[in-house]
Image (cartoon, helix red, strand yellow):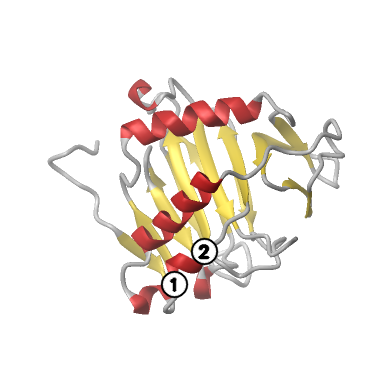
Amino acid sequence: MHGALFPRPRAVVAPGAVHVPAWLSEERQRELVEVCRDWARGPVPIRHTVLPSGGVMSVQTVCVGWHWQPYRYTRTAGDVNGARVAEFPDWLAELGRAAVAGAYGAPQESGAYDPASYAPDTALVNFYDGDARMGMHQDKDERSGAPVVSLSIGDRCVFRFGNTTDRGRPYTDVELSSGDLFVFGGPSRFAYHGVPKVYPGTADPATGMSGGRLNITLRETGLR
């Protein structure tokens, strides 16, 4: 069990992949939970994404800025209700730049990436209940190679961060707790990653989540 007496250290998991524990304050987590609840109601509501194979993802997803469906981005959600997704707010882009700056504190870890140049324009918000999983995959539908920012709120999970070649080993399992930040870019931008396990009942209601895991990922699509 983590606590104030045993702070978890910042860790470089792979070149360009950085884990920063407890990056979000409880207050900021509550604010993000509330805005995510608003997004989940629409204009394009949260849903289980249907894959081209006919399979259905166990996580529930709502998008902001651009609508993601396998394996492309659109402004409108033709696979849901045809509505245009919510606009990507400036304050979320500012949070993304702060996150990249918080992760890439040393040039040798970031490949000299300048956090001020980070311009995310989409957010994929995934909700995991206790049974939800995310298989190993690459985030490669974007035209930009800018880093991906991942924020966790609610239940703890195992985040499996792999290599850029395939879904198998080598990979590293990282425990992500509520408030944690994970950024991957540079040599690790197209690493396979997934969530093989969520720990139900580990969410602190003070964060605004009584159960389940909320994952907010910010990306640059490179689209106009």
- Disc 2 designates what residue? 118
**What is the quadrant of residue 14 in the picture?**
bottom left
- Residue farthest front in this picture: 90
Image spot of residue 71 (x, y percent): 78, 54
Q: Is residue 199 visible?
A: no
In the displayed structure, 59 sits above or below 168; it is above
How far is the residue under mark 2 from the one under mark 1? 7 Å
The answer to the question of whether label 2 and label 1 lie on touching residues, with beta carbons closer than 8 A, is: yes
Identify the residue at image location x=16%, y=39%. Answer: 4
In the displayed structure, 24 sits above or below 167; it is above
Is 213 in front, or is 172? 213
Is 133 in front, or is 220? 220
Is 191 in front, or is 46? 46
- Disc 1 designates what residue? 114
Image spot of residue 64 (x, y percent): 65, 42
Tell me which amino acid carries mark 2. Tyr
